[in-house]
Amino acid sequence: MRRVIFSLFLFAFSTMFAAAQQYDLVLEGGRVMDPETGLDAVRNVGIRDGKIVRVSSEALSGRRVVHASGLVVAPGFIDLHQHGQELESQRVKALDGVTTALEMEIGVPDVAQFLKAKEGHSLIHYGTAASHAAARALVFGAPLSASGSSTRAGIPEILPKSGPATDQPATPDQIEAIRERLRAELDAGGLAIGMGIQYTPGATRLEVIDMFRLAAERRLPVYTHVRSSGRIEPGSSIESISEVIGAAAITGAALHIVHINSSCTRDSLECLSLVEGARARGLDVTTEAYPYIAGMTSINSALFNPGWREEMGIDYSELVLPDTGEHLTKERFDELHNSPTTHWVLIFSNTQEMVDKVIPHPLVMIASDGAEGHPRNAGTYARVLAQYVREKGTLTLMDALRKMTLMPAQMLERSMPAARLKGRLQEGADADIVVFDANTIGDRSTFQKPMEPSVGVRYLVVGGTVVVDEGKIVPDVFPGRALMGLGKRSASHN
Ligand SMILES: [Zn+2]
């Protein structure tokens, strides 16, 4: 009898214990929004083992319960285009609502080394494309540094300096060597082929098509910064968008055109109509933009090869050094362009009016192109929510979230099927979640103070771990995991 009572007691105790511990974390009473299903209602979210297990209007119990009433609970933002992969940038991304930030435009010089260096040291999820520009530089005997330059130690070089490796055409043997290097980089976990065609102007149309052919063989997409952002022919942005859409049509590779706002500037709506036309013909072409009128790049890159002023329709004074705010003159430009040290420069080439038309466009995802020195690194997502949803009213909150979560996750599904579990606030999805105050969320980063974090993100959950708690970064947690392309060697046999 005593034994029975004891067993009953144990049973009751363990049931109670199980109920109290049912979830690791519960987000209680928030406005849960999921762009895929259209759910927009007050719900409780139960998280266990890094997954969203329950989305319900019933009360849920957990080891920790976060009261989210009055706050939006949405999938964490997925930034397909983030260059600043170091911890300082990850912190401001987290406070901007980002749970995954990928270097997809160009890619790092060494995929395996990048993934190894970040393992266990990453606040948010990370991943990279295999870099055509870096493979080309390697084949031309001018390799980029995977561990960074002396001035930017630990930050991989992604852009080659202007020279033979960027400006000369490759021989057929060199093209094959570039493809061989890219195959190895994809085997190492590259999510796509990243091309910055404007940074390798020596690459012929055929070299570009050959890279798309390799992507198609691996059933992976090409992410590209197109050949030119000019407004006159030859070399117009219209021509360069047509080039990559043509390559996608010829090869069957999916294509993602990065920052259509800065590649097409005042012709962005025309460029968007080209993407729209390609999609209407059944091609897999997508694009993205960031909500700022200035771009930023390396001043000794091939983007500033002779003729850039005529081509881009801008002058020296529209180039500004991010750290000092200095507007350049011809003399100062020549000095920095010829310097062996990499200097970043802001390019004021777009208008607010155009950016305001591009961001709400239904085909445009939000992606930051972030790196230290430009406010887009810290402020892109909160800025869209503040300016376009709250102030201008040109986007609904759900549509803005779709551009930041579901659309990039669907793009990522071309590289890894497991991305079906990202960008969704649904049972079974990965517990990458942002909890924010829609009334106060906003960017604070400026061209003068580019690393000021956004406000309004109250909680951020990465793979079930809280990394932003009551608006503050939690110290010493690194739940970020690598996103990688899978089984690439065998992909061609499927
Ligand atoms: Zn770019």
Image (cartoon, rainbow, N blue to C red):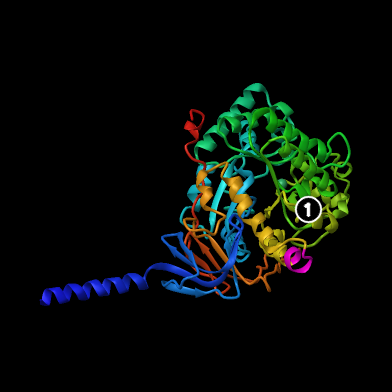
| Residue 291 vs residue 66, the one in the foreground | 66
Where residue 338 appears, as percent x and y from the top left, is 77, 44
Specify whether residue 342 is painted magenta. Answer: no
Taking the image as shown, residue 104 lies to the left or right of residue 63, namely right
Q: In the image, what residue type sits under mark 1?
A: Val
Specify whether residue 388 is painted magenta. Answer: yes
| Residue 484 vs residue 391, the one in the foreground | 391
Residue interval drawn in magenta: 387-393
Q: Residue at x 80, y 58 (%)?
A: 356
Residue under label 1, please give it: 358
Where residue 121 appears, as percent x and y from the top left, is 49, 57
Most common secondary structure along the magenta stretch: helix
Q: Residue at x 73, y 37 (%)?
A: 278
- List the single residue furthest toward the left: 1
- Residue 269 in the image: above or below residue 469: above
Q: Residue at x 57, y 55 (%)?
A: 423
Label 1's element? helix
- List the single residue furthest toward the top: 172
Quadrant of the drawing holding the N terminus = bottom left
Q: Residues within 10 Å of mark 1 (few under 14, many from 20)?
A: many
Q: Quadrant of residue 34?
A: bottom right
Does the rendering let one see residue 268? yes
| Residue 326 vs residue 482, the one in the foreground | 482
Label total for image: 1
- Residue 169 in the image: above or below residue 349: above
- Residue 392 in the image: above or below residue 182: below
